[in-house]
Image: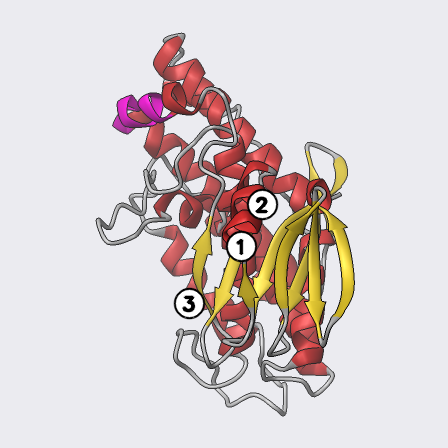
Amino acid sequence: MKRTIEISTRGTRLFLDAGRLVVHRDEEDLARIPLEDLGVVVLDSTGVSISSGALKALAEAGCAVLACDDTHHPNGLFLPLAANSLHGERIQLQADAGIPLRKNLWARIVQRKILNQALICSGAIERGLIGLSAKVRSGDPGNCEAQAARLYWAQIFRGVDTIEQPFHRFREGPPPNGLLNYGYALIRALVARSLCAAGLHPALGLHHRNRYNAFALADDLMEPFRPVVDGVVLGLVRSGVASVHKESKQALLEILTAQVEVEGQSVSVELAAERAASGLAKALVAAVKDGDAAPIAAEHLCLPAIRRRTAS
Protein backbone atom coordinates (compact mmCIF):
# COMPACT_ATOMS: atom_id res chain seq x y z
CA MET A 1 0.00 0.00 0.00
CA LYS A 2 1.29 3.44 -0.96
CA ARG A 3 2.01 6.04 1.73
CA THR A 4 0.60 9.54 2.02
CA ILE A 5 2.90 11.99 3.80
CA GLU A 6 2.41 15.61 4.78
CA ILE A 7 5.23 18.14 5.10
CA SER A 8 4.12 21.20 7.08
CA THR A 9 7.18 22.62 8.87
CA ARG A 10 8.93 25.66 7.43
CA GLY A 11 12.55 25.13 6.48
CA THR A 12 12.04 21.52 5.37
CA ARG A 13 13.80 20.48 2.15
CA LEU A 14 12.84 17.52 -0.03
CA PHE A 15 15.38 16.11 -2.45
CA LEU A 16 16.35 12.88 -4.16
CA ASP A 17 19.20 10.65 -3.06
CA ALA A 18 19.86 7.05 -4.12
CA GLY A 19 16.24 6.42 -5.17
CA ARG A 20 14.79 7.81 -1.95
CA LEU A 21 12.98 11.00 -1.05
CA VAL A 22 14.99 12.71 1.67
CA VAL A 23 13.15 14.89 4.20
CA HIS A 24 15.78 17.29 5.58
CA ARG A 25 15.54 20.02 8.22
CA ASP A 26 17.94 21.71 10.64
CA GLU A 27 20.97 19.98 9.08
CA GLU A 28 19.44 16.57 9.74
CA ASP A 29 17.81 13.92 7.53
CA LEU A 30 14.45 13.23 9.21
CA ALA A 31 13.41 10.50 6.78
CA ARG A 32 14.63 8.68 3.69
CA ILE A 33 11.60 7.15 1.97
CA PRO A 34 11.77 4.78 -1.03
CA LEU A 35 9.99 6.46 -3.96
CA GLU A 36 8.01 3.32 -4.76
CA ASP A 37 6.37 3.54 -1.31
CA LEU A 38 4.85 6.98 -1.96
CA GLY A 39 1.40 7.67 -3.37
CA VAL A 40 0.67 11.28 -2.38
CA VAL A 41 2.96 13.96 -0.92
CA VAL A 42 1.17 16.94 0.67
CA LEU A 43 3.13 20.21 0.97
CA ASP A 44 1.36 22.30 3.60
CA SER A 45 3.76 25.17 4.14
CA THR A 46 5.09 27.99 1.98
CA GLY A 47 8.46 27.42 3.62
CA VAL A 48 8.98 23.91 2.18
CA SER A 49 11.30 23.45 -0.82
CA ILE A 50 11.42 20.49 -3.21
CA SER A 51 14.06 19.88 -5.87
CA SER A 52 13.25 19.45 -9.55
CA GLY A 53 15.01 16.09 -9.41
CA ALA A 54 12.66 14.95 -6.66
CA LEU A 55 9.61 16.08 -8.66
CA LYS A 56 10.83 14.22 -11.74
CA ALA A 57 11.51 11.05 -9.76
CA LEU A 58 8.17 11.23 -7.94
CA ALA A 59 6.37 11.52 -11.29
CA GLU A 60 8.26 8.52 -12.65
CA ALA A 61 7.25 6.57 -9.54
CA GLY A 62 3.58 7.48 -10.08
CA CYS A 63 3.31 9.77 -7.05
CA ALA A 64 1.08 12.87 -6.89
CA VAL A 65 2.24 16.05 -5.14
CA LEU A 66 -0.44 18.25 -3.55
CA ALA A 67 0.34 21.85 -2.55
CA CYS A 68 -1.66 23.88 0.00
CA ASP A 69 -2.37 27.61 0.29
CA ASP A 70 -1.92 29.87 3.31
CA THR A 71 -5.18 28.60 4.82
CA HIS A 72 -4.00 24.96 4.62
CA HIS A 73 -6.44 24.09 1.84
CA PRO A 74 -4.99 22.14 -1.12
CA ASN A 75 -4.82 24.35 -4.22
CA GLY A 76 -2.35 22.73 -6.62
CA LEU A 77 -1.70 19.23 -7.95
CA PHE A 78 1.34 17.74 -9.73
CA LEU A 79 0.55 14.47 -11.54
CA PRO A 80 2.52 11.67 -13.26
CA LEU A 81 1.15 12.02 -16.81
CA ALA A 82 3.35 9.32 -18.38
CA ALA A 83 2.55 6.59 -15.86
CA ASN A 84 1.06 4.20 -18.46
CA SER A 85 2.57 3.03 -21.75
CA LEU A 86 -0.86 3.21 -23.44
CA HIS A 87 -1.42 6.83 -22.45
CA GLY A 88 -1.81 8.12 -26.02
CA GLU A 89 -4.22 5.38 -27.05
CA ARG A 90 -6.32 5.74 -23.91
CA ILE A 91 -6.65 9.51 -24.36
CA GLN A 92 -7.88 8.91 -27.92
CA LEU A 93 -10.48 6.47 -26.55
CA GLN A 94 -11.61 9.15 -24.10
CA ALA A 95 -11.96 11.67 -26.93
CA ASP A 96 -13.91 9.16 -29.06
CA ALA A 97 -16.26 8.01 -26.30
CA GLY A 98 -19.86 8.56 -27.35
CA ILE A 99 -22.61 10.26 -25.38
CA PRO A 100 -24.45 6.97 -24.58
CA LEU A 101 -21.36 5.54 -22.90
CA ARG A 102 -20.68 8.72 -20.92
CA LYS A 103 -24.30 8.84 -19.77
CA ASN A 104 -24.32 5.19 -18.69
CA LEU A 105 -21.06 5.61 -16.79
CA TRP A 106 -22.36 8.74 -15.09
CA ALA A 107 -25.53 6.93 -14.04
CA ARG A 108 -23.46 4.22 -12.34
CA ILE A 109 -21.38 6.86 -10.56
CA VAL A 110 -24.45 8.77 -9.33
CA GLN A 111 -26.24 5.63 -8.19
CA ARG A 112 -23.28 4.44 -6.13
CA LYS A 113 -22.72 7.90 -4.65
CA ILE A 114 -26.34 8.06 -3.45
CA LEU A 115 -26.18 4.54 -2.01
CA ASN A 116 -23.00 5.47 -0.13
CA GLN A 117 -24.69 8.62 1.18
CA ALA A 118 -27.56 6.46 2.42
CA LEU A 119 -25.09 4.42 4.50
CA ILE A 120 -24.10 7.59 6.37
CA CYS A 121 -27.72 8.38 7.22
CA SER A 122 -30.52 6.55 8.99
CA GLY A 123 -34.29 6.21 9.16
CA ALA A 124 -36.51 7.94 6.62
CA ILE A 125 -33.58 9.80 5.01
CA GLU A 126 -31.70 6.56 4.43
CA ARG A 127 -34.79 4.96 2.89
CA GLY A 128 -35.40 8.04 0.75
CA LEU A 129 -31.86 7.98 -0.59
CA ILE A 130 -32.04 4.28 -1.40
CA GLY A 131 -35.31 4.96 -3.24
CA LEU A 132 -33.69 7.78 -5.22
CA SER A 133 -30.74 5.58 -6.20
CA ALA A 134 -33.16 3.14 -7.83
CA LYS A 135 -34.55 5.97 -10.00
CA VAL A 136 -31.23 6.95 -11.56
CA ARG A 137 -31.28 6.52 -15.33
CA SER A 138 -28.71 7.00 -18.07
CA GLY A 139 -27.33 10.52 -17.75
CA ASP A 140 -29.40 11.13 -14.60
CA PRO A 141 -32.09 13.17 -16.43
CA GLY A 142 -34.18 13.41 -13.26
CA ASN A 143 -31.23 15.00 -11.42
CA CYS A 144 -31.42 12.42 -8.65
CA GLU A 145 -27.95 13.50 -7.53
CA ALA A 146 -29.20 16.99 -6.61
CA GLN A 147 -32.34 15.62 -4.96
CA ALA A 148 -30.20 13.29 -2.87
CA ALA A 149 -27.87 16.15 -1.89
CA ARG A 150 -30.78 18.16 -0.45
CA LEU A 151 -31.88 15.23 1.70
CA TYR A 152 -28.36 14.22 2.68
CA TRP A 153 -26.90 17.55 3.77
CA ALA A 154 -30.03 18.36 5.77
CA GLN A 155 -29.50 15.14 7.77
CA ILE A 156 -25.83 14.37 8.15
CA PHE A 157 -24.82 16.94 10.82
CA ARG A 158 -28.25 17.42 12.39
CA GLY A 159 -28.09 17.57 16.17
CA VAL A 160 -24.32 18.13 16.37
CA ASP A 161 -23.87 21.00 18.84
CA THR A 162 -20.60 22.26 17.36
CA ILE A 163 -22.12 22.78 13.89
CA GLU A 164 -24.18 25.77 12.79
CA GLN A 165 -27.71 24.52 12.15
CA PRO A 166 -29.02 23.96 9.56
CA PHE A 167 -25.79 22.94 7.86
CA HIS A 168 -25.16 24.12 4.29
CA ARG A 169 -22.46 22.61 2.15
CA PHE A 170 -20.41 25.12 0.19
CA ARG A 171 -16.67 25.57 -0.20
CA GLU A 172 -16.31 28.87 1.63
CA GLY A 173 -18.89 28.03 4.29
CA PRO A 174 -18.46 27.70 8.06
CA PRO A 175 -17.07 24.57 9.77
CA PRO A 176 -16.87 21.76 8.99
CA ASN A 177 -16.76 22.82 5.33
CA GLY A 178 -12.99 23.29 5.65
CA LEU A 179 -12.56 19.69 6.78
CA LEU A 180 -14.70 18.49 3.88
CA ASN A 181 -12.66 20.59 1.44
CA TYR A 182 -9.39 19.12 2.69
CA GLY A 183 -10.65 15.54 2.57
CA TYR A 184 -12.15 15.94 -0.89
CA ALA A 185 -8.90 17.42 -2.19
CA LEU A 186 -7.01 14.35 -0.97
CA ILE A 187 -9.50 12.05 -2.70
CA ARG A 188 -9.30 14.15 -5.86
CA ALA A 189 -5.51 13.82 -5.91
CA LEU A 190 -5.71 10.07 -5.33
CA VAL A 191 -8.29 9.57 -8.09
CA ALA A 192 -6.37 11.80 -10.51
CA ARG A 193 -3.19 9.81 -9.85
CA SER A 194 -5.08 6.54 -10.40
CA LEU A 195 -6.50 7.82 -13.69
CA CYS A 196 -3.01 8.71 -14.91
CA ALA A 197 -1.75 5.27 -13.88
CA ALA A 198 -4.57 3.76 -15.99
CA GLY A 199 -3.44 5.82 -19.00
CA LEU A 200 -6.36 8.25 -18.80
CA HIS A 201 -6.24 12.03 -18.74
CA PRO A 202 -8.04 13.64 -15.77
CA ALA A 203 -9.16 16.66 -17.83
CA LEU A 204 -11.49 14.76 -20.21
CA GLY A 205 -14.64 14.33 -18.15
CA LEU A 206 -17.79 12.27 -18.47
CA HIS A 207 -20.21 14.71 -16.84
CA HIS A 208 -18.03 17.55 -15.54
CA ARG A 209 -16.85 19.29 -18.73
CA ASN A 210 -15.97 22.86 -17.70
CA ARG A 211 -13.19 24.09 -19.98
CA TYR A 212 -11.48 25.71 -16.98
CA ASN A 213 -11.37 22.43 -15.02
CA ALA A 214 -8.17 20.45 -15.55
CA PHE A 215 -9.49 17.57 -13.41
CA ALA A 216 -13.01 17.03 -14.76
CA LEU A 217 -12.69 13.24 -14.99
CA ALA A 218 -11.23 13.04 -11.49
CA ASP A 219 -14.20 15.07 -10.26
CA ASP A 220 -16.53 12.58 -11.95
CA LEU A 221 -14.91 9.45 -10.62
CA MET A 222 -14.40 10.71 -7.07
CA GLU A 223 -18.13 11.25 -6.45
CA PRO A 224 -18.79 7.81 -4.84
CA PHE A 225 -15.74 8.35 -2.60
CA ARG A 226 -17.01 11.63 -1.11
CA PRO A 227 -19.16 9.90 1.56
CA VAL A 228 -15.98 8.24 2.87
CA VAL A 229 -14.73 11.74 3.71
CA ASP A 230 -18.13 12.73 5.07
CA GLY A 231 -18.12 9.81 7.49
CA VAL A 232 -14.68 10.69 8.85
CA VAL A 233 -15.63 14.37 9.20
CA LEU A 234 -18.84 13.35 10.98
CA GLY A 235 -16.76 11.41 13.49
CA LEU A 236 -14.47 14.39 14.01
CA VAL A 237 -17.26 16.90 14.64
CA ARG A 238 -18.99 14.53 17.04
CA SER A 239 -15.76 14.53 19.04
CA GLY A 240 -15.72 18.34 19.06
CA VAL A 241 -13.30 18.89 16.16
CA ALA A 242 -14.72 21.07 13.38
CA SER A 243 -11.75 22.97 11.91
CA VAL A 244 -8.58 22.16 9.99
CA HIS A 245 -5.49 21.75 12.17
CA LYS A 246 -2.64 19.29 12.61
CA GLU A 247 -4.63 16.55 14.35
CA SER A 248 -7.70 16.77 12.10
CA LYS A 249 -5.51 16.74 8.98
CA GLN A 250 -3.84 13.58 10.21
CA ALA A 251 -7.24 11.92 10.61
CA LEU A 252 -8.16 12.97 7.08
CA LEU A 253 -4.88 11.68 5.65
CA GLU A 254 -5.82 8.25 7.00
CA ILE A 255 -8.88 8.25 4.72
CA LEU A 256 -6.75 6.88 1.90
CA THR A 257 -6.12 3.68 3.88
CA ALA A 258 -9.74 3.31 5.07
CA GLN A 259 -11.51 0.12 4.04
CA VAL A 260 -14.35 0.01 1.50
CA GLU A 261 -15.90 -2.84 -0.47
CA VAL A 262 -15.40 -3.38 -4.18
CA GLU A 263 -17.19 -6.31 -5.79
CA GLY A 264 -17.55 -8.02 -2.42
CA GLN A 265 -13.91 -7.58 -1.39
CA SER A 266 -12.61 -5.37 1.40
CA VAL A 267 -9.94 -3.04 0.00
CA SER A 268 -8.35 0.29 0.87
CA VAL A 269 -9.68 3.53 -0.62
CA GLU A 270 -6.40 3.77 -2.51
CA LEU A 271 -6.87 0.36 -4.15
CA ALA A 272 -10.55 1.11 -4.79
CA ALA A 273 -9.54 4.25 -6.71
CA GLU A 274 -7.09 2.23 -8.79
CA ARG A 275 -9.77 -0.36 -9.58
CA ALA A 276 -12.27 2.33 -10.50
CA ALA A 277 -9.80 3.96 -12.89
CA SER A 278 -8.82 0.62 -14.38
CA GLY A 279 -12.49 -0.32 -14.79
CA LEU A 280 -13.18 2.97 -16.53
CA ALA A 281 -10.35 2.28 -18.98
CA LYS A 282 -11.80 -1.18 -19.66
CA ALA A 283 -15.22 0.36 -20.30
CA LEU A 284 -13.73 2.74 -22.84
CA VAL A 285 -11.89 -0.08 -24.61
CA ALA A 286 -15.04 -2.22 -24.65
CA ALA A 287 -17.27 0.51 -26.08
CA VAL A 288 -14.96 2.43 -28.41
CA LYS A 289 -12.50 -0.24 -29.55
CA ASP A 290 -14.54 -3.46 -29.29
CA GLY A 291 -17.95 -1.98 -30.15
CA ASP A 292 -19.86 -3.22 -27.09
CA ALA A 293 -23.19 -1.53 -26.35
CA ALA A 294 -22.87 1.34 -23.88
CA PRO A 295 -24.83 -0.30 -20.99
CA ILE A 296 -22.72 -3.47 -21.28
CA ALA A 297 -19.41 -1.60 -21.54
CA ALA A 298 -20.29 0.56 -18.53
CA GLU A 299 -20.53 -2.55 -16.35
CA HIS A 300 -16.71 -2.70 -16.34
CA LEU A 301 -16.71 0.33 -14.02
CA CYS A 302 -16.44 -0.98 -10.45
CA LEU A 303 -17.08 1.51 -7.66
CA PRO A 304 -16.65 1.40 -3.86
CA ALA A 305 -19.36 0.68 -1.31
CA ILE A 306 -18.51 2.34 2.01
CA ARG A 307 -18.75 0.81 5.45
CA ARG A 308 -21.96 1.72 7.25
CA ARG A 309 -21.83 4.64 9.68
CA THR A 310 -25.11 5.76 11.23
CA ALA A 311 -25.77 9.43 11.83
CA SER A 312 -28.18 8.99 14.72
Per the picture, the main secondary structure of the magenta-coloured stretch is helix
| Residue on which the image places disc 2 | 58
Give, as a single range, the part of the protein colored magenta: 91-99
- Amino acid at dot 2: Leu
| Dot 3 alpha-carbon crowd within 10 angstroms: few under 14, some 14 to 19, many 20 or more | few
Element at badge 3? Answer: helix
Q: Point out residue 35 in the picture as x, y percentages from the top left corner.
A: 68, 44
Q: Are marks 1 and 2 in contact (CB under 8 Å)?
A: yes
Q: How is the image coloured?
A: secondary structure
Choose mark 3 or mark 2, whichever is in front. 2
| Residue on which the image places disc 1 | 65
Quadrant of the image occupied by residue 242:
bottom right
| Residue on which the image places disc 3 | 150
| Dot 2 alpha-carbon crowd within 10 angstroms: few under 14, some 14 to 19, many 20 or more | many
Q: Which residue lies furthest to the front in this view?
A: 27
Element at badge 2? Answer: helix
Q: Point out residue 220 in the picture as x, y percentages from the top left corner.
A: 41, 46
Choose mark 3 or mark 1, whichever is in front. 1
Q: Do the residues labelled 3 and 2 touch (CB within 8 Å)?
A: no
Choose mark 1 or mark 2, whichever is in front. 2
Foreground residue among 195 and 100: 195
Between discs 1 and 2, the one toward the N terminus: 2
Q: Looking at the image, which residue is at 34% across and 27% down?
A: 94
Quadrant of the frame with the N terminus: top right
Report how far apart the C-alphas of labels 1 and 2 lie in the structure.
8 Å
Q: Point out residue 219 in the picture as x, y percentages from the top left corner.
A: 41, 50
Q: Looking at the image, which residue is at 62% across and 66% down?
A: 13
Between discs 3 and 1, the one toward the N terminus: 1
Report how far apart the C-alphas of labels 3 and 1 lie in the structure.
33 Å
